[in-house]
Image (cartoon, rainbow, N blue to C red):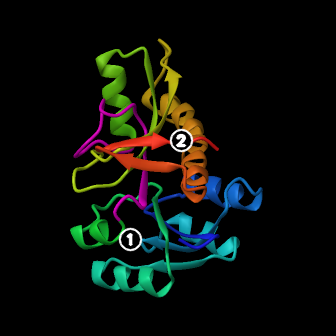
Amino acid sequence: MTSITNICVFISGGGTNLQSLIDGEKNGEFAGKIKLVISNKKDAYGLVRAEKAGIKNIWERDNGKILKILKDENIDLIVLAGYLKILPPSIIREYENKIINIHPSLIPSFCGKGYYGLIVHQKALERGVKITGATSHFVNGETDGGPIIFQETVKVLEDDSPEILQKRVLEIEHKVLVKSVKYFCLEKLKVENKKVKILKE
């Protein structure tokens, strides 16, 4: 890994988590450079955010082409920031323990196939949980099944709607994601026995 970590952010939508990373880089919160943004959707607003920040951005759905682009750009870390497409084994193998995803619940609750977006918060409210939150994890072949990096909690209030809860959790997602990238860039995340060990700064 280079002294400055080259980062590629994968998005599918509005890119608020991407924006938190753009702001984090600008504020010097991690020793990395967002070199590239890739979207599987042509009209994703996250591409506009990248353009405004002067970051190279691409709309691409072909996994073979994506892997070649990642290598050509010397990417060290992939961050999935609301990327609603399953990564192929070829990319997961190539970037083992170098792909970070953010999920809007406390894994292993409300995660896995079909659990994304507002659905996660609907299910949390239906179950009557008192706390929820956000989880960052490394990506492996199992949906939301990779080693957990960081988790933060959010209280669930009696009058919460899925939309209101989603908004509060999103604020935590931003913090957890930036923190995770920071520790990765510092080489303070070590995977042992399918668990992440956080090394001291």
Q: Amino acid at mark 2?
A: Glu
Q: Position of residue 123 (x, y in %)?
A: 30, 28
The answer to whether residue 106 is magenta is yes
Q: Is residue 15 above or below residue 116?
A: below
Q: Is residue 60 above or below residue 152?
A: below
The disc, 2 or 1, on the residue closer to the chain's N-terminal end is: 1
Left or right, 62 with respect to 199, comes to: left
Q: Residue 39, located in which quarter of the rendered image? A: bottom left
Q: Nearer the viewer, residue 169 or 4?
A: 4
Q: Amino acid at mark 1?
A: Asn
Left or right, 27 with respect to 38, comes to: right
Contact check, label 2 and label 1, Cβ < 8 Å: no
In the rendered structure, find residue 40 and report the number of the disc placed on it. 1
Q: Which residues are magenta?
A: 96-117
The answer to whether residue 52 is magenta is no
Name the residue beneath numbered marker 2: 173
Please tell me whether mark 1 sits on a helix, a strand or a loop: loop
Please tell me whether mark 2 sits on a helix, a strand or a loop: helix
